[in-house]
Amino acid sequence: MTRKISFSEAVNEAMKLAMRKDPNVILLGEDVAGGATVDHLQDDEAWGGVMGVTKGLVQEFGRERVLDTPIAEAGYMGAAVTAAATGMRPIAELMFNDFIGSCLDEVMNQGAKLRYMFGGKAKVPLTVRTMHGAGFRAAAQHSQSLYALFTHIPGLKVVVPSTPSDAKGLLLASIFDDDPVIFFEDKTLYNMKGEVDEEFYTIPLGKADIKRQGSDLTIVAIGKQVHTALKAAELLKERGIETEVVDPRTLSPLDEETILASVEKTGRLIVIDEANPRCSAATDISALVADKGFDYLDAPIKMITAPHCPVPFSPALEDLYLPTPEKVLRAAAEIIGDETIVTV
Amino acid sequence: MTIAKSQTKSITQEKAKWMYQKMNEIRQFEDKVHEIFSKGVLPGFVHLYAGEEAVAVGICAHLSEKDYITSTHRGHGHCIAKECDLNGMMSEIYGKATGLCKGKGGSMHIADVEKGMLGANGIVGGGFPLAVGAGLTAKLKKTGGVAVCFFGDGANNHGTFHEGINLAAIWKLPVIFVAENNGYAEATPFEYASSCQNIADRAAAYNIPGEIVDGKDVVAVYEAAERAIERARNGQGPTLIECKTYRNYGHFEGDAQTYKSSEEKQKHLQELDAIVRFRKHLLANGLVSEQELMHIEQNVAEAIEKAVEFAENSPFPTEEELLRDVYVSY
C-alpha cells in the first residue's frame, strides 16, 4: 500500500527497514543520533542529523548501531570501508558531499579499489549517503553536486534519486548491494512529498526511469533537475512538442540502453545537470549519445548546466547559477528550429 | 594543568575601551542577525558567535593588519575583532553587492584579506593548515606578523589538527592555535567526541606550550594571548591556547538546542556572561567610567542599526558577477 510521505521520510524508512532486516546494517556519521552521552536528552529529542533525516533511528536501534562520530570524516569513512570489508553493512553519512575533501582518500583509494587490488578477494558493501545541491543559499562549500567526481572512479556506484519513491527503493538496493555506493540526496528535495510503498522494495541500480513519454525531444535530467525537465515538458506541450523525460537514477552504472532508445525515438537531446559543466554527467551522457547514437540525432545535443564557477551565496546569483525551465525552452527552440517556443 | 586567571592590570585604558566596544559590537551584531534571521529575511545558514566574544577580542587585541587569522563557520566575531567593516559584513550576510565578498561568500565565508581575515570556513578543521601557510609567509618574508587559527572543539578531532600543528611546530612558525571549546560540536558534547580532558593537553604531543584559559574572561584571554604571541614573534614557534567558552545560541539558527540543560544555559548566559564581567572589571579597576561605557554601548547600537540599513538599501549583485573572480586571468 502506498501513502504520501516526504523524500526525507522515504530515506528514513529505507534505513529503518534495512536495519530491521539485517543486524549488520549500522549507521554512522556526525550527529546521526545527536547529543551522545547527554544525560537529560531523551532519544526522541535527539537531532537525527542536521536535517532530521535519521531522526528516530537511535530510538529503535540504539546507539550501538546508530553511531555519532566526531567531526572526523577521514576517520569514520575509513572505518566504514573496512567495517564493510570485514562483515558489516554500514551506511556512512557524509553530511554534505562537499566534505568529501576531508575523506576522499578513504573513498577513492581505499573503498573503491579494495576488491580490484585484492584480486576479487574482498567486497565493500558500504553506502555513503550524502547531501548535495544548490538553491539552499548554503554557498560554495555546502551546495555542490559532486556526483561526477565519484562516477569517474571505477569501483564506486553512484545513485542520484529524484523522487521519494525512487529514493526509498534505490537506497534499499544500495544498502544491500555488495559494492560501495555513493547515494546523493538533494537537500532541496527533502520536503517534497510523493506516493511511496510502505513495504520493503528495491529498484535495481543501473535502470533508468522514463518519467514522461514523448516523441519529439528527449531530456535526460539528473536528480532534482528531473523536475525542471518535467516543468519544461509541460510548457513545451503547450507549443505542441512532446518531450520524453529520462531519469537515469544511477550514474554508475549508467543505463545507456534506455537513453539511446529514447534519442533514437525523438532525434533530439537536451541534458540537464546542475553540476559544473566540465567533465560532468552532462558531458558524459552527451558523449555517450554522440559516440553510440550519432545517427539518431536530427540536431546538436544541448546541455543545460551550471556555469563553470563555484556556487555563489547571494540568492540573486544562485538563481542565475541553476538550470531553469526557461533555459530548457531556449535550448529546445534552438534545436527544434522554432523561435516561437521561447515566447511562452 | 590549571586554568589561567587574569592577575594583572595589563590592559591600557585605550585598549580596554576598544575591547569593550568590540565585544559589544559582536554581541549586538549577532543578536541583530538572530532577530533578522527569525523573520526569514536572511538567506542560508548562520552560525552565531554571541557568548564567545572574549576569545576573539582578547586575542585580536594584540593583532594588527599584518597579522592573519583563520576562522570557523562561526566567523562573525572573528571578523569584528579583526576590525572588518560592519556595513560590509552585514551586507555580505544579506547577499548584497556591497558585502565584504560582494555577496558571493555569505555568512559562512565572510572574509577580508586586507584586514588579515582569511575567511570564515564551511569546512570544520579547514583553518589549521591555512594558518600554517600564513605563518610560513610571515616567517619567510620576515614580516614580524603572526597567524592565529581559531577553531572549535569539534575541529580538534579532525585530522588537519594534527597535520597543521605538527607542521607549525617542526618549522617553528609564528602561529597561535586558539581552541574555542564551547562544549558542543553541533549537538555532540566535547567529552563524548574527544579522547582527552582538555584540548590544550594535546599540545604535549607536539612539544609546544598548551594553556587553558577561562574563555569568558577577556582579560585572561588577553594575557594568555600576549604570552603566546610574544613567543611566536620571537621565533619560538606555536602555542595552543584552549579557551573554555559557551555559545549563547544554537549550532546554527533554527537549532532547538535540546542537548543543552537549562541550568548550564542560565549559568553561562547570566552569571558568567563575558561582557557583564568585563564591564564590572573595568568599573572596579577604574579603567573606564560608567558614562563612557554607556556611550560605547549606545554608539555600537547605532552602528549596528546603520549596518542593517546599509545592507537593506544595497543592491544585489548582477549577472556579470557570476563568472567574475573564478580566475585571476579571465
Image (tube, helix red, strand yellow):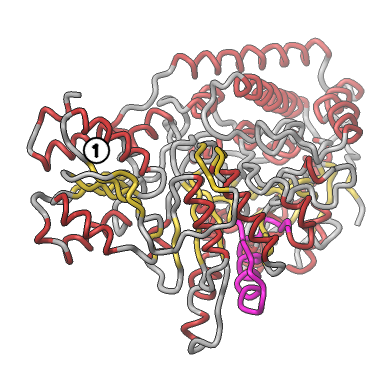
Residue under pointer 1: A328
| B196 on left or right of A271 | right
| B136 on left or right of A273 | right
Relative to the observer, which residue lies in front, A71 or B179? Answer: A71
**At label 1, which amino acid type do we have?**
Val
* Res B183 quadrant in image: top right
Chain that bears disc 1: A
Residue B19 location in percent, x, y? 73, 29
Q: Is residue B90 above or below residue B236?
A: above
Relative to the observer, which residue lies in front, B91 or A61? Answer: A61
Number of other residues with Cα within 10 Å of mark 1, as a class: few under 14, some 14 to 19, many 20 or more:
many
- What is the span of residues highlighted in magenta in the rendered image? A66-93
Relative to the observer, which residue lies in front, B263 or A169? Answer: A169
Residue at 38% across, 61% down: A207
Residue A291 location in percent, x, y? 17, 66
Q: Is residue A87 magenta?
A: yes
